[in-house]
Image: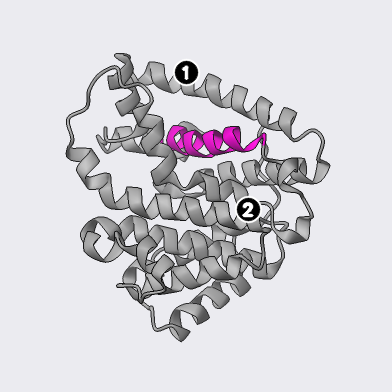
Amino acid sequence: MDFSTPNINGTNTKLEAAMTEEMDTRNLRCYQLEKTLHLAASSTELCYHDCDFEEKKSIALYIWYMFYVDDMASRDVDSFAPFQQRFLRRSPQLDPVLTAFADLLLRMCDQYDTITANSIISATFEFVNSTCIEPDLERMPLVQGVLRFPLFVRDRTGVSTSFALMLFPFSKKILVTGYIQALPDMIFWVSLSNDLLSFHKEELAGDTNNYVHIRALMEEKAPIEVLFEMGQELTLARQTIYKALAGSPTATAAWLGFERGYVASHLAQKRYKLQDLGL
């Protein structure tokens, strides 16, 4: 992808201060949020750099609360599984962070057009629901040849739809029709780029419960062969994205900034151990 590191400082102290204020005002302070505050803010600054501050704040809070759900849902399924029903019934949530997450989704309706906001909310519902069932999926025996299952699970647990859609707030004045044809490949690119860039650290940790290994099992291939195919698929997806966005220079610029920031955020984090590979 002819990658070059964006000239952006991944630290935004104003954004982190706003997130801290939100946490303390709502009395949410806990280890799970404190340990991911900088990561959520940094990812937002790198990937959504050209959004205004209030938009960045909403995106950073979204990513932050998403991390919390990913960390906590499997430990307390009974509190997290009813999230959607309680949201729709206007009932109190069973975890204070979920209350903040629900309020944030409503606020985002003022920053995105109706269709985009609806899609972000729907994707969030899918994410929380799928994260709650993920521990059961991990224990479930896999059937070889069920080829669509790995991507089905990846799409719903990766919340890639929201990552893509949050690029297009009202302020950018991009109609849904300006990016909708690119959206399937955007979602695919976000999910599988993360899996490709995570593969090295997961191999070092002996972690085989990931998209690469599950797909390898389903397709009866070696994991490294699947990884190579993913690289080809991601290249094609990226080409398709730019082809679909060609009619909207603003959408094209937004995506270019996102993809460079997304890769840069992975390269910058020591947890991915990509420095070991000279990246």
Position of residue 49 relative to residue 58, above or below, is above
Label 2, label 1: how many angstroms apart (C-alpha)? Answer: 31 Å
Magenta part, dominant SS? helix
* Residue 159, horizontal then vertical, whole percent: 47, 48
* Lower position in the chain sequence, tag 2 or tag 1: 2
Q: Residue at x 40, y 20 (%)?
A: 226
Q: In this figure, what is the number of numbered marks?
A: 2
For residue 252, side relative to residue 133 (left or right) = right
Residue under label 2, please give it.
116
Q: Which residues are magenta?
A: 181-198
Q: Local crowd at mark 2 within 10 Å, few (<14), some, or many (≥20)?
A: many
Membership of 199 in magenta stretch: no
Check the image and report above or below for 64 versus 163: below
Q: Work out whether residue 37 or residue 92 is closer to the camera in this orientation and state it.
A: 92
Q: Which mark is residue 87?
A: none
Q: Nearer the viewer, mark 2 or mark 1?
A: 2
Q: Which residue is mark 1?
A: 229
SS label for mark 1: helix
Q: Is residue 150 shown left or right of residue 64?
A: left
Q: Residue furthest front?
A: 89
Q: Residues within 10 Å of mark 1 (few under 14, many from 20)?
A: few
Instruction: Specify the amino acid type for callout 1.
Output: Glu
Q: Secondary structure at mark 2?
A: helix
Q: Is residue 254 visible to us here?
A: yes
Q: Quadrant of the N terminus?
A: top right
Relative horizontal placement of residue 184, taking residue 79 as reference (left or right): right
Residue 79 spot, x, y in % from top left: 26, 66
